[in-house]
Image (cartoon, rainbow, N blue to C red):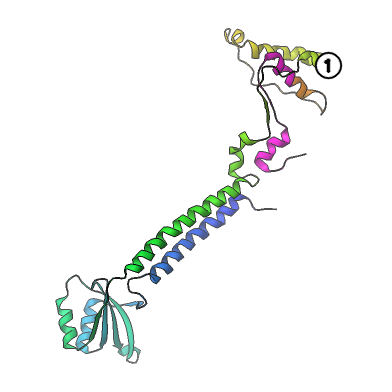
Amino acid sequence: MKPSWRIILLWTLPALVIGFFLWQGTFASATSSLGGNTASTRMTYSRLLEYLDAGRVTSVDLYEAGRTAIVRAVDPELDNRVQKLRVDLPATAPELITKLREADVALDSHPANNEGAIWGFLGNLIFPILLIAALFFLFRRSSNMPGGPGQAMNFGKSRARFQMEAKTGVMFDDVAGIEEAKEELQEVVTFLKQPERFTAVGARIPKGVLLVGPPGTGKTLLAKAIAGEAGVPFFSISGSEFVEMFVGVGAS
C-alpha cells in the first residue's frame, strides 16, 4: 500500500525545516567573517583586561572592524595551556591598545571577509528556493496520488462525456419496454423545457431524479432521451470514473 500524500508531507515538512536550521548553522560558521580562527569559549572584556595585567595573553587577533577579538591566553586552570577565547569588544576601548603595547602582546587586525558575506547571502537565498521547489514537487506528486489534493481540482479533467448539441439523437420513441417510466419522466421534460410554468405558481423544480435498476435496463438511454426531448445538454459519467477522481481506480 502506497503512503498517502498527507503522510508524505507530515514527514517531509519537519525534515525540511530541521535541514534548514542545520544548513544555517553549518553555513553560517563556514562563511563567518572570522574565517577558520573561531573560538567556542567566550570571555568578557573586563576579564581580558585582567588577563593582560597578569601577563597571560600571548596574542590578539581583531575581526569585524575591531568589534571581535580572538585571544590566545594561558589558562592556569588548564595546567597553563594556551586557550583560544572570543571577546566582544566595546565600541571605544582606548586602554586596550595601551595595555597590549605595555604587555608586548602580538596584535593583528584582519579585514572584513566580503567573500564570506557573499556566500552567506547566497546560502540564505538558495535554501528557501530549494525548500519551495521541494514543496512544489511534493504537491505535484501528491496531486497524482489517490486521494491527493489535486484530484478534486481535476474534476473538469475527468472522463465525463458532455454532449452540448440541442438534440442528443435519442427520443422517448427510441426507448421501448418502459412506458410507465417514460410517462413519469414526461413531467421532468416539461420542467426542463418550460420551467417558468412551475416557478410562476411557486413550484420548485426537482434537483434530480434517481433511476434504479440492474445494468442493461436502459437507464442511461432513458436519461439521454430526456435530454433529447427537452433539448438540453447531456452529461454522462460512470460511478467508477467518479470514484476514481477521489480514491484512485474505482470498480471496473
Total of numbered circles in the picture?
1
Pick the residue in front: 209 or 230: 230
> Where's residue 170, x and y in %?
76, 18
Pick the residue in front: 218 or 80: 218
Local crowd at mark 1 within 10 Å, few (<14), some, or many (≥20)? few
Secondary structure of the residue carrying tag 1 is loop
Residue 235 drawn above or below residue 124: above
In this view, the residue farthest toward the bottom is: 79
User: Quick check: 191 left or right of 93?
Assistant: right
Q: Within the image, what quadrant is residue 32 found in?
A: bottom left
User: Quick check: 89 left or right of 138?
Assistant: left
Residue 175 part of the magenta-drawn span: no
The structure residue drawn at horizontal position 76% and vertical position 24%, both measured from the top left corner, is 220
The structure residue drawn at horizontal position 40% and vertical position 61%, both measured from the top left corner, is 122
Pick the residue in front: 252 or 137: 137
> Where's residue 114, x and y in %?
32, 68
Q: Write down the residue under mark 1.
A: 176
Residue 249 part of the magenta-drawn span: yes
In this view, the residue farthest toward the right is: 177
> Where's residue 41, x and y in %?
34, 78
The structure residue drawn at horizontal position 50% and vertical position 59%, both measured from the top left corner, is 16
Residue 141 drawn above or below residue 27: above
The structure residue drawn at horizontal position 58% and vertical position 38%, both measured from the top left corner, is 153
Q: Amino acid at mark 1?
A: Ala
Residue 202 drawn above or below residue 238: above
Q: Which residues are magenta?
A: 223-252
Q: Within the image, what quadrant is residue 212 found in?
A: top right
> Where's residue 104, x and y in %?
20, 89
